[in-house]
């Protein structure tokens, strides 16, 4: 895996070339093994690259990589899993290769087929191509958004990079805050693509390429999920055939991702998805797979015992680390540097820790990301569907009345009732952090008449009403609402999964995994997000994804071929840390310092009385505002470092 940065400008190119060196160095964590620079002062073009050597470790694979005549230049971040097949086809067309890298295959595929070559690629990638023959730049991002690509385009200046920090390394980059992005960040805990925190700066959308020529930038969509109508579930799908087909496609996806010239392993949480990926790795491997997991000595946050059981059964070479609270909290001051844009998913902390653990033994690791969004793995899907169905028989005034009654029930009493139910049926009551979920449940019930509002209540932190008090201005629409409108013809459950595939998956989960792993120089590959897997799963009927209260139905049937059901049929456990408790103990002073009334008034962005109220309620134990307060803390820490 790698990192790249580049520019195109006619204004003072000498200055930009000098600054490109610092911008490239800012990405050294993404590519600690090698670096390269290219300048063309006449054209006002510069490219910088940092390399993490995975395939062909020789200097022949160095980037930026040029065509034989030097008129086409490529910088590339990713892995092409079918590069040998494409290489063979190109050799048949007369192309000769100087390296064994997939980078050279990408370059010569473009030379043969133009930008449409990306439609032949199987893998994860972000890349930039300077085509001096036609005086144009191409920017390309993979279908699911596994690899990042940012760009800034203003007044004839184009900047692009794998991370936002590389853009900020240029003095000519305008750090002009987009204030409309602030409520979006607080609402979702991330910034929905294509927006960033800065004006004139964007994320290239997944499945898109952009061309920049004649002073214009035009984006094109080259891939999207196959269309599925409300009647697709009536198709003639044999469960047995689907089971065999899905296992075959997943096995191929895993096998493709085992190609590497450096040590390779897997991140194992003990959940359905990562366990299945490891089982399939072990199935096609000739030696024990190296697996890595992390644990905490905190009830409700310790996945290590599950992972260890799975590893023993599969016979992997397993490594686990029980992180101390001190180790976990030492990550917090590093988060603004690692993510370089406001990001408030607290599971970034254990993700950084497990990435560091894996990097101590391997350079490449497979993960199980992407299963929840394809196979109805989140409890919020079922909760939203239940509430929306209930809203069809319960009038709005009843929901408003009942929600008001629920709000009068003390959280402590509601939690006791919940725990009593869980003792009776632990499989059905497996959601941890009840106190944080209680008010979300009430809000979801209240909003159930509006699908978009209901799902927002299930996934978001600060409500829209709170944000209108917390931050001045309105609440802008984003990709979230756009996808809901595009999927109106789909069944509700399928609709929710597609919304997450287009928003939460690339902008939260994949952003988290990319930045956390790359911060320690680890490449993470995601077999479940092979576009061939996603295209197949998107056409499966709902009953093969969610059946009689069982999510991930088909994945579990495949996993049961390798692991006894008793080892994985357990309540879903989130990958997180006890921020709620930390805010009342070790992180209390940090919270009070960064969210002090004096600081907030000086900045003039947030409503101080509301913030003070939420802090008091949390510290007293009256309510659990951990995610609200964490989002504010992450904003303030990011702002301190980068503005």
Image (cartoon, rainbow, N blue to C red):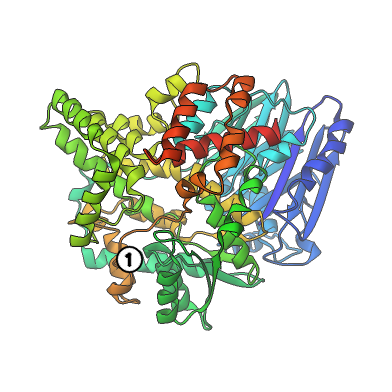
Q: Horizontal and vertical percent for residue 42?
A: 87, 32
Q: What residue is pinned by disc 1?
A: 245
Q: Secondary structure at mark 1?
A: helix
Is 373 displayed left or right of 566 in the figure?
A: right
Residue placed furthest toward the top? 473
Does 572 sit above or below residue 293?
above
| Residue 527 can be seen, yes or no | yes
- Report if residue 143 is visible in the image: no
Percent of width and height locating residue 506 = 49, 44
The x and y percentages for residue 441 are 27, 39
- Using a 10 Å C-alpha cutoff, classify the residue at mark 1 as few (fewer than 14 neighbours), some (14 to 19) or many (20 or more): few
- Would you identify the image quadrant in which residue 380 lies? top left
* 88 with respect to 481 (left or right): right
Is residue 393 depicted above or below 248 in this figure?
Answer: above
Say which quadrant the N terminus sits in.
bottom right
- Name the residue at 80% across, 36% down: 45
Numbered-mark total = 1
At a point 47% along the width and 34% down the height, the residue shown is 615
Q: Could you tell me which quadrant the C terminus lies in?
A: top right
Horizontally, is 12 left or right of 562 in the view? right
Pick out the residue farthest to the left: 393
Residue 125 place in picture, x, y as percent = 59, 51
The foreground one among 549 and 48 is: 549
Residue at far front of view: 620
Task: Give whichever of 641, 286 is nearer the camera.
Answer: 641
Front one among 309 and 229: 309
User: Which residue is pictured at 62% across the width and 44% down the height?
Assistant: 339
């Amino acid at each position: 895996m790698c990192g790249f940065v580049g520019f195109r400008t006619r204004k003072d190119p000498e200055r930009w070339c000098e600054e490109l060196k610092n911008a490239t160095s800012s990405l050294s964590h993404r590519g600690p093994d090698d670096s390269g620079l290219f300048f063309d002062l006449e054209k006002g073009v510069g490219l910088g690259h940092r390399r993490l050597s995975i395939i062909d470790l020789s200097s022949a694979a160095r980037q930026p990589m040029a065509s034989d005549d030097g008129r086409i230049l490529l910088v590339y971040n990713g892995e092409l899993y079918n590069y040998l097949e494409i290489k063979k086809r190109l050799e048949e067309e007369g192309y000769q290769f100087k390296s064994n890298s997939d980078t050279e295959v990408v370059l010569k595929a473009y030379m043969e087929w133009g930008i449409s070559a990306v439609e032949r690629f199987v893998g994860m990638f972000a890349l930039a191509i300077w085509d001096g023959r036609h005086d144009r730049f191409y920017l390309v991002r993979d279908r699911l958004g596994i690899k990042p690509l940012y760009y800034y385009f203003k007044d004839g200046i184009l900047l692009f990079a794998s991370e936002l920090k590389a853009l900020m390394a240029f003095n000519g980059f305008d750090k002009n805050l987009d204030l409309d992005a602030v409520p979006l960040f607080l609402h979702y805990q991330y910034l929905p693509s294509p927006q960033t925190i800065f004006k004139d700066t964007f994320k290239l959308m997944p499945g898109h390429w952009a061309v920049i020529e004649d002073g214009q930038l035009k984006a094109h969509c080259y891939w999207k999920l196959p269309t599925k109508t409300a009647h697709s579930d009536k198709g003639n799908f044999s469960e047995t055939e689907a089971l065999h087909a899905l296992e075959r496609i997943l096995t191929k996806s895993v096998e493709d991702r085992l190609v590497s010239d450096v040590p390779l392993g897997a991140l194992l949480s003990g959940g359905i998805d990562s366990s299945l990926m490891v089982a399939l790795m072990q199935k096609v491997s000739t030696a024990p797979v190296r697996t890595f997991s992390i644990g905490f000595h905190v009830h409700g946050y310790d996945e290590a015992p599950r992972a260890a059981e799975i590893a023993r059964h599969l016979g992997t070479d397993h490594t686990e680390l029980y992180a101390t609270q001190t180790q976990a909290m030492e990550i917090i001051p590093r988060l603004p540097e690692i993510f370089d844009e406001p990001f408030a998913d607290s599971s970034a902390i254990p993700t950084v820790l497990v990435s560091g653990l894996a990097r101590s033994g391997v350079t490449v690791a497979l993960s199980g990301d992407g299963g929840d969004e394809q196979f109805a793995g989140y409890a919020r899907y079922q909760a939203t569907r239940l509430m929306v169905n209930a809203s069809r028989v319960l009038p709005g005034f009843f929901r408003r009345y009942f929600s008001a009654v629920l709000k009068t029930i003390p959280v402590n009493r509601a939690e006791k009732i919940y725990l009593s139910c869980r003792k009776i049926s632990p499989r059905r009551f497996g959601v941890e952090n009840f106190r944080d979920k209680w008010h979300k449940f009430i809000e979801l019930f209240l909003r159930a008449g509006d699908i978009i509002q209901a799902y927002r209540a299930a996934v978001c932190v600060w409500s829209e009403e709170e944000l209108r008090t917390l931050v001045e201005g309105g609440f802008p629409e984003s990709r979230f609402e756009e996808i809901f409108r595009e999927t109106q013809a789909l069944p509700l459950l399928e609709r929710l999964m597609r919304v997450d595939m287009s928003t939460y998956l690339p902008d939260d989960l994949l952003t988290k995994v990319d930045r956390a792993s790359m911060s320690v120089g680890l490449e993470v590959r995601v077999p479940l997000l092979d576009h061939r897997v996603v295209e197949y799963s998107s056409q499966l009927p709902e009953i093969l994804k969610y059946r009689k209260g069982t999510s991930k139905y088909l994945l579990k049937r495949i996993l049961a071929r390798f692991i006894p059901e008793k080892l994985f049929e357990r309540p879903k456990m989130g990958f997180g840390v006890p921020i709620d408790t930390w805010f009342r103990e070790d992180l209390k002073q940090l919270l009070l310092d960064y969210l002090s009334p004096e600081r907030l008034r000086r900045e003039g962005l947030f409503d101080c009385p509301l913030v003070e109220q939420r802090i008091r309620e949390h510290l007293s134990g009256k309510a659990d505002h951990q995610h609200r307060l964490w989002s504010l803390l992450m904003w303030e820490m990011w702002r301190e470092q980068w503005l």
